[in-house]
Amino acid sequence: MAEPRIRHHGAADGVTGSCHRYEAFDDAHLLIDCGLFQGESASEDVLSQHRIDFDLSTVRALVVTHVHIDHVGRLPYLLAAGFRGPILCSVPSARLLPLVIEDALKVGFTRDRRLIERFLETVSGQLVPLDYQRWHTVLDEAGRTVRVRLQRAGHILGSAYVEVDASDRESGHRDRTVFSGDLGAPYAPLLPAPRPPSRADTVVIESTYGGRIHDDRRRRRQRLKAVLERSLQAGGTVMIPAFSIGRTQELLYELEGIIHAAGRGAGSPVDWQKLRIIVDSPLAARFTEVYRDLKPYWDAEASRRVRAGRHPLDFDTLHTVDDHDAHERTVSYLATHPQPAVVLAASGMAAGGRIVNYLRAMLGDARHSVLFVGYQAPGTPGRALQAMADSDAPDRVVTLEGDAVTVRAGITTIGGYSAHADENDLVNFIRRMRRWPARIRLVHGDRRAQQALRDRLKQQAPAATRIELAADQSAVTERAAGIGSKRR
């Protein structure tokens, strides 16, 4: 079977900047995601790094797998470069994308409301919401067709993996390529687990957690409960750097479940009703409202809770901090009047946002703690703090936005709450297809993670399956004959 060419404009050797170009024909390409670089992958010359430096005249559509900033944050650059094609995404993503882009514009471009609204109007005019499991035709001309279909990925609300089907009636060539986007872990809160595609000739799959295995849900819930109990007993705040969309809502769901179950138990050493859950992010609050509106996309377990009269994302001890003045008052109060609390605030890697103010104010007090529940990219303050978890040195220091901050607070990581599939899940995504694909391309992972996942896949894949690392330039630049090179 002939193969198309796939070029990577990000996330070839790291976990940010996802942007992949599928060349069905020389004059008909698809762009899968268009995200920002973050952490060590980010350059000091932001404009130069994110500038669109490839020909857009052949790009027939942008397909968005989900709305995390490392998958959609380059959209302003893409439109500024002249892209006016359709932006295909799931129905929930179409609700969430304008919120993400509005926030990105405020942080990185402009606070001019008129300019922001004009840009959002342009984006809204190009958005094409797609139902899951239905084919959508992108190209149908001269005997050539390109279709895409979205399937649930279980990563965040609206996330999808993408099936691309390209065919050429004249040559008889046909190709089915799957782009995984970011895959969620089975048994994650709120969302159904992804089901593998039935078949594919090529699979382009993320490898964020290659070489790593998550705790199961029962164990990670027990660990989360233990962290919360320590907070209640110490009278301190648990600071959780969390992305505004996905992780925050999943954690709220789990926290409601823990508090609900503990409230029914007898003989608890702590009073769970004293634990305040604080979401300090206007963006997270807006996302949570959308999550509530989109209950039909929740999984069966979450739906059962709702039918039982519970409110997993809107419970009694949950408080939302909106404006900046309220944020500053909350930080000051918790720092000077320690009390049992959980604060969820962005950014998820502690590289900016409101969480930094909490960390500055409370890292020096041993009554408080920091809980990491997601991947921390190299070069971010989150990764630096995470590395201090096993150290009891009295001189621990982290740099936050240029300031050196002493660290006496406890540092804990619960990897099982990552929204990403672990190595077992990634292998199963491919292994459970009806047959192995002819080619597997590993993206969205550092070289160590890609190599670990490749080695694991090689143990099970048939000899005919080629497993490539996007980090290898030879794989990135290869060009095969067939649909990808056919000229019209």
Image (cartoon, rainbow, N blue to C red):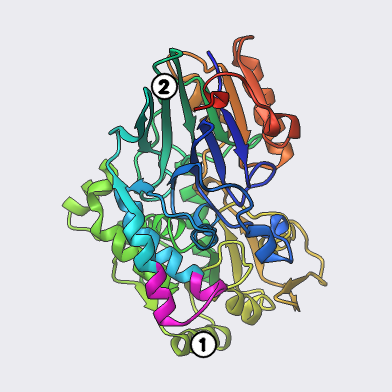
For badge 1, the amino acid type reads: Glu
Please indicate whether residue 91 sits to the left or right of residue 464 in the image.
left
Magenta stretch, main secondary structure class: helix
Along the line of sight, the residue nearer the viewer: 2 or 381: 2
Question: What's the amino acid at mark 2?
Answer: Ser
Residues in magenta, as a range: 105-119
What's the residue at 52%, 18% (across, down)? 437
Q: Is residue 409 visible?
A: yes
| Residue 355 percent coordinates (x, y) | 56, 73
Does residue 284 sit above or below 181 in this rendering? below
- Residue 303 in percent (x, y) is at 23, 48
Count the labels in the image.
2
> Residue at the location (52% across, 39% down)?
421
**Sequence order check: which comes first, mark 1 or mark 2?**
2
- Check the image and report above or below for 104 versus 188: below
Q: Residue at x 83, y 72 (%)?
A: 395
Determine which residue is flagged by label 2: 167
Q: Residues within 10 Å of mark 2 (few under 14, many from 20)?
A: many
Inspect the magenta stretch and tell me whether residue 112 lies in it: yes
Q: Is residue 328 above or below residue 367?
A: below
Q: Is residue 321 magenta?
A: no
Residue, disc 1: 328
